[in-house]
Image (tube, rainbow, N blue to C red):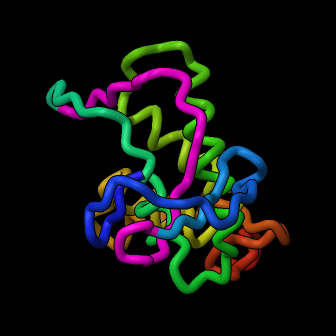
């Protein structure tokens, strides 16, 4: 593995352990050239998947984009990183097991929304506001009124029969 600091071609694995619900291996490495330590992750990739975006633009699937979007939606919500990693790994597995070489971006968005709905209602609404392109406060209101929190309350904290 090439060192990200000095570009030396060799590094030693100092520690390996499973992560993300045993779907990846985390490796701590040390560069033989400069001695710097860095972390790599090893994941199974079943096939190369192309994402078809609006306007028929195509690009390779990038797990990092989902990680970034979900992390942003969950920011300051107290959702453990491990749960975010599990959600992202679950979406990636769904995409890879579809057996298709191309997947619509909207389908990926729906998979993420399904995962966030179960993880955190506020993060779900945050993601939906970008994914569904909310333009007015009324869009948030209408969407939030359809969502029930785990405790049976609407996200806004109002019971449906009290508003």
Q: Position of residue 5 (x, y in %)?
A: 30, 72
Q: Quadrant of residue 83?
A: bottom right
Farthest residue to the right: give it: 151
Q: Quadrant of residue 72?
A: bottom left
Q: Residue at x 64, y 50 (%)?
A: 115
Say which of 68 and 16 sits in front: 16
Q: Position of residue 88 (x, y in %)?
A: 58, 51
In the image, 108: left or right of 137? right
**Residue span colored magenta:** 31-54
Say which of 81 and 161 sits in front: 81
In the image, 153: left or right of 156? right
| Residue 2 is at least partly visible in this image | yes
The magenta stretch spans residue 5: no
Q: Position of residue 43 (x, y in %)?
A: 58, 42
Q: Residue at x 75, y 75 (%)?
A: 159
The magenta stretch spans residue 52: yes
Q: Position of residue 101 (x, y in %)?
A: 40, 15
């Amino acid at each position: 593995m090439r060192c990200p600091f000095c570009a030396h071609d060799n590094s030693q694995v100092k520690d390996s352990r499973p992560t993300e619900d045993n779907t990846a291996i985390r490796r701590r490495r040390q560069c033989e050239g400069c001695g710097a330590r860095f972390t790599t992750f090893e994941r199974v990739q079943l096939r190369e998947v192309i994402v078809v975006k609006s306007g028929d633009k195509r690009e390779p699937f990038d797990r990092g984009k989902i990680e970034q979007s979900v992390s942003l939606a969950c920011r300051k919500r107290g959702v453990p990183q491990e749960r975010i990693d599990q959600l992202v790994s679950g979406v990636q597995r769904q995409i890879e097991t579809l057996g298709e070489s191309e997947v619509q971006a909207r389908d990926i968005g729906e998979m993420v929304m399904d995962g966030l709905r179960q993880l955190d209602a506020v993060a779900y609404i945050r993601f939906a506001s970008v994914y569904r392109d909310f333009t007015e406060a009324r869009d948030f209101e209408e969407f939030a009124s359809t969502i029930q929190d785990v405790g049976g309350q609407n996200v806004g904290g109002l019971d449906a029969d009290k508003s």
